[in-house]
């Protein structure tokens, strides 16, 4: 029997509750499709700080590196806001991305028909199926450039650097993604001001020659932020750098009505991937069994697709989620005033049954 090793990082806040629903779905699919799963629990974020004094240990990184895929909940809690940068829960995420070479961050945003009323955009703007995928570079740029703070505390700088190979490999992912979708890539940069963006644009144009069927457009990031609001239907795949992708993906998540629905994947050259909802740890609702587990469940679908190569399982999860949403089942973030909201585990059970 085929067996997969999956690293589990429940993390902080609502992390443990939503990951439990993801595990439920994985177990059900293993049963239905006849494969085995070995789950390996590790600690990250505040959870790791409380146990080991650091947000992620080298041993944990070693273990994760030996897995086929990693499922994560969320990290962060206001309790750790006063920590030095090295000890903040976010540091764990950055270290994991870098150490495991997770350079490609894939963040799809789809507005489901059943949830159209939840989008803050007018129906006249969303005149069709809104389905955008952000491909964000995750191992370079200003997140990993040289950081300097002057001794007197009066100045500080962050370097934004990109190399041609770094841009090439992420651009390739975006074009390949576009080939499986609507064959359009919008590359977002700030080439009118930044030299790293000029290198970015040059390199993306170079790579685009290998994908003649894909239409390539370029937008400056300020304009892209505006276009996402006034004409989001023009987008298919958005290819962009680490910082711009961070900002635009949050903006995009709002367009689909609930941040509780959006999954993400961060993958490396050998298909190892970290799968996590794009929302945070939501400490204010932690432990109440009311968080929306759908983003995590859809992250599991991405895991089956990109790391385990089990495309049927991925499709099955996505249809099960759709079925549950179409039947009108909602967690508190999406329930209407006159509707009884279902709990995290009830939604997880419904999705599992729908499988
Ligand atoms: C994200 C988050 C992270 C980032 C933080 C928590 C370091 O905002 O995954 O988008 O900036 O990349
Ligand atoms: Mg972010």
Image (cartoon, grey):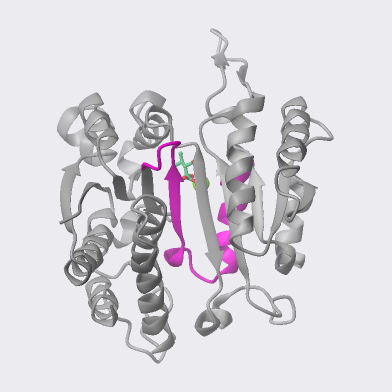
Is 255 in the magenta?
A: yes
User: Residue 298 lies in what quarter of the image?
Assistant: bottom left
Image quadrant occupied by the N terminus: bottom left
Left or right position of 93 against 179: left
- Image coordinates of residue 136 in percent, x first then y, are 57, 44
Image quadrant occupied by the C terminus: bottom left
User: Residue 43 lies in what quarter of the image?
Assistant: top left
User: Residue 338 lies in what quarter of the image?
Assistant: bottom left
- Identify which residue, 5 or 41, lies in the foreground: 5
Magenta-tinted stretch: 244-272
Left or right position of 221 against 237: right
Left or right position of 197 against 96: right
Give the residue at x 75% y 36%.
206
Is 58 in the magenta?
A: no
Q: Is residue 311 above or below residue 246?
A: below
- Identify which residue, 292 or 153, lies in the foreground: 292
Give the residue at x 22% y 41%.
47
Q: How many numbered markers are drawn? A: 0
* Furthest residue in direction bottom, as rendered: 338
Q: Is residue 16 above or below residue 48?
A: below
Left or right position of 314 against 233: left
- Image coordinates of residue 162 in percent, x first then y, are 64, 26
- Image coordinates of residue 204 in percent, x first then y, are 72, 38
Visible residue check, residue 282: yes
Q: Is residue 275 above or below residue 130?
A: above
């Amino acid at each position: 029997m085929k067996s997969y090793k999956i690293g589990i990082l429940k993390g902080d806040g609502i992390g443990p509750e939503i990951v439990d629903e993801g595990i439920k779905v994985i177990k059900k699919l293993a049963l239905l499709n006849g494969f085995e799963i070995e789950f390996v629990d590790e600690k990250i974020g505040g959870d790791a700080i409380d146990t080991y004094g650091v947000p992620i240990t080298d041993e944990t990184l070693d273990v994760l590196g030996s897995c086929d895929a990693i499922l994560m909940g969320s990290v962060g809690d206001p309790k750790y806001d006063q920590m030095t940068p090295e000890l903040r829960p976010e540091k764990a995420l950055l270290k994991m991305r870098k150490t495991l070479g997770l350079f490609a961050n894939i963040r799809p945003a789809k507005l489901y028909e059943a949830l159209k009323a939840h989008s803050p955009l007018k129906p006249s703007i969303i005149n069709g199926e809104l389905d955008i995928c952000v491909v964000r570079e995750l191992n370079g740029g200003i997140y990993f450039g040289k950081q300097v703070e002057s001794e007197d505390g009066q100045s500080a700088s962050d370097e934004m650097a990109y190399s041609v190979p770094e841009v090439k490999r992420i651009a390739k992912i975006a074009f390949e993604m576009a080939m499986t979708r609507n064959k359009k890539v919008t590359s977002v940069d700030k080439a009118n001001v930044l030299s790293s963006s000029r290198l970015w644009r040059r390199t993306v144009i170079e790579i685009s020659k290998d994908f003649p069927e894909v239409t390539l457009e370029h937008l400056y990031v300020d304009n892209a932020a505006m276009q996402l609001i006034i004409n989001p239907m023009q987008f298919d795949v958005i290819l962009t750098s680490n910082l711009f992708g961070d900002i635009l993906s949050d903006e995009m998540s709002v367009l689909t009505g609930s941040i509780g629905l959006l999954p993400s994947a961060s993958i490396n050259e050998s298909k190892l991937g970290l799968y996590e909802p794009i929302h945070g740890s939501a400490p204010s609702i932690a432990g109440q069994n009311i968080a929306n587990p759908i983003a995590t469940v859809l992250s599991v679908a991405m895991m089956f697709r990109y790391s385990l190569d089990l495309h049927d399982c991925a499709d099955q999860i996505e249809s099960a989620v759709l079925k549950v949403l179409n039947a009108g089942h909602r967690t508190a973030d999406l329930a209407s005033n006159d509707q009884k909201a279902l709990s995290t585990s009830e939604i997880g059970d419904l999705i599992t049954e729908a499988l």
